[in-house]
Image (tube, rainbow, N blue to C red):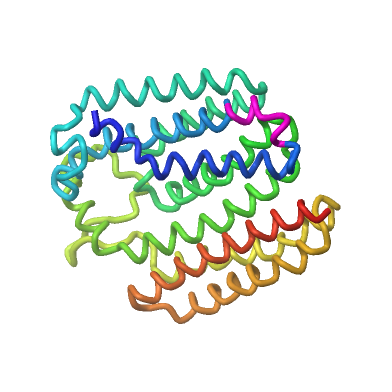
């Protein structure tokens, strides 16, 4: 039983549920206490669908996990392969069912995200930039889902976009940071991967290498952060948040600009790890700016 609880990665599920709550809060503010029913359904749906995504991820990664993460529920035989598949399907369906009690848009997002979580685990997670983009979309869409549940997506959509634009570069930097471990995982699974189109790694006479240069990844990451920084004043320009947001988002923008500068000189694993942490800090500073901006308005 505990294996099934572990396979959904409860912390990730709680983070997704919290993001939905924030997305609804951006719209309703303190009125959230009076209109809690659709929000509750949306939070439950996000928790279950995220759990389904984690379970299906372990299902597809079982061969690699047997070699690299033998303590996970399936390799350790606390959850069967078939059990993980059935469990993930049940979670997806239960999450979609809860979303049906919110709004048509939220219901549609729940179906689409369930599909994307399946496709990500099946094919996209190891593809060049596609996996990073999918994670970025799924992260940003949780805020959008919260807004959709209460029939107002304008501000949650903007924050979701900014969240995606900062998650995308962090995922790229994490990939570069984890090259050694990921390349070993790739060579382990190389024999049973049938289609290697757009894989991040390739096998050469010199060993396993990235298909793109680190510099290309860092430039792509920096560009995404630059776009996020340039778009950060838009919520204030549109009159959706108070002037205090514009003041409080400056520290987040400074952190992102610092990450761009550090990317130009990054070479060691420690450099990439530091950039990844900085992006995460900037992300939370931006979230605090949004919350302050709507509470003061």
User: Does residue 219 belong to the magenta stretch?
Assistant: no
Tell me where residue 53 appears, x and y as whole percent.
39, 34
**For this view, does 139 lie left or right of residue 78?**
right
Depth check, front residue: 152 or 205? 152
Tell me where residue 138 appears, x and y as whole percent.
52, 42
Please provide the residue range marked out in magenta. Answer: 32-40
Q: Which residue shows up at 15% across the image and 42% down it?
A: 66
Tell me where residue 266 sits by quadrant.
bottom left
Q: Is residue 104 above or below residue 227?
A: above
Tell me where residue 50 sits by quadrant.
top left
- Residue 232 in view in this figure: yes
**For this view, does 185 lie left or right of residue 178?**
left
**For this view, does 4 lie left or right of residue 114?**
left
Q: Which residue shows up at 18% across the image and 63% down it?
A: 207
Tell me where residue 123 appears, x and y as whole percent.
36, 38
Q: Which residue shows up at 52% across the image and 38% down it?
A: 17
The image shows a total of numbered marks equal to 0
User: Does residue 36 belong to the magenta stretch?
Assistant: yes
Residue lying furthest front in this view?
Answer: 33
Q: Is residue 86 above or below residue 185?
A: above
Main secondary-structure element of the magenta-colored stretch:
helix
């Amino acid at each position: 039983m505990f294996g099934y609880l572990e396979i959904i990665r409860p912390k990730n599920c709680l983070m997704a549920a919290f993001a939905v709550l924030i997305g609804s809060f951006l719209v309703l503010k303190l009125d959230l206490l009076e209109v809690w029913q659709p929000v509750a359904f949306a939070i439950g749906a996000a928790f279950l669908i995220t759990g389904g995504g984690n379970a299906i991820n372990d299902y597809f990664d079982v061969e690699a996990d047997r070699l690299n993460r033998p303590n996970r529920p399936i390799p350790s035989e606390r959850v069967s392969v078939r059990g993980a598949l059935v469990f993930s399907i049940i979670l997806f369906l239960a999450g979609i069912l809860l979303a049906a009690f919110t709004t048509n848009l939220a219901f549609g997002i729940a179906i689409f995200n369930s599909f994307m979580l399946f496709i990500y685990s099946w094919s996209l997670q190891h593809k060049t930039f596609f996996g990073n983009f999918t994670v970025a979309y799924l992260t940003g869409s949780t805020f959008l889902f919260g807004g959709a549940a209460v029939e107002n997506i304008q501000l949650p959509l903007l924050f979701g976009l900014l969240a995606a634009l900062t998650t995308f570069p962090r995922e790229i930097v994490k990939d570069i940071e984890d090259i050694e471990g990921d390349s070993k995982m790739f060579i382990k699974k190389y024999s049973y991967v049938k289609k290697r189109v757009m894989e991040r790694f390739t096998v050469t006479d010199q060993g396993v290498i990235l298909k793109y240069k680190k510099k290309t990844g860092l430039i792509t990451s920096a560009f995404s952060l630059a776009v996020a920084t340039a778009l950060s004043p838009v919520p204030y320009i549109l009159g959706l948040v108070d002037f205090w947001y514009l003041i409080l988002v400056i520290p987040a923008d400074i952190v992102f600009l610092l990450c761009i500068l550090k990317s130009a000189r990054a070479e060691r694993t420690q450099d990439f790890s530091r950039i990844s942490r900085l992006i995460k800090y900037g992300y939370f500073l931006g979230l605090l700016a949004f919350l302050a901006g709507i509470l003061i308005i």
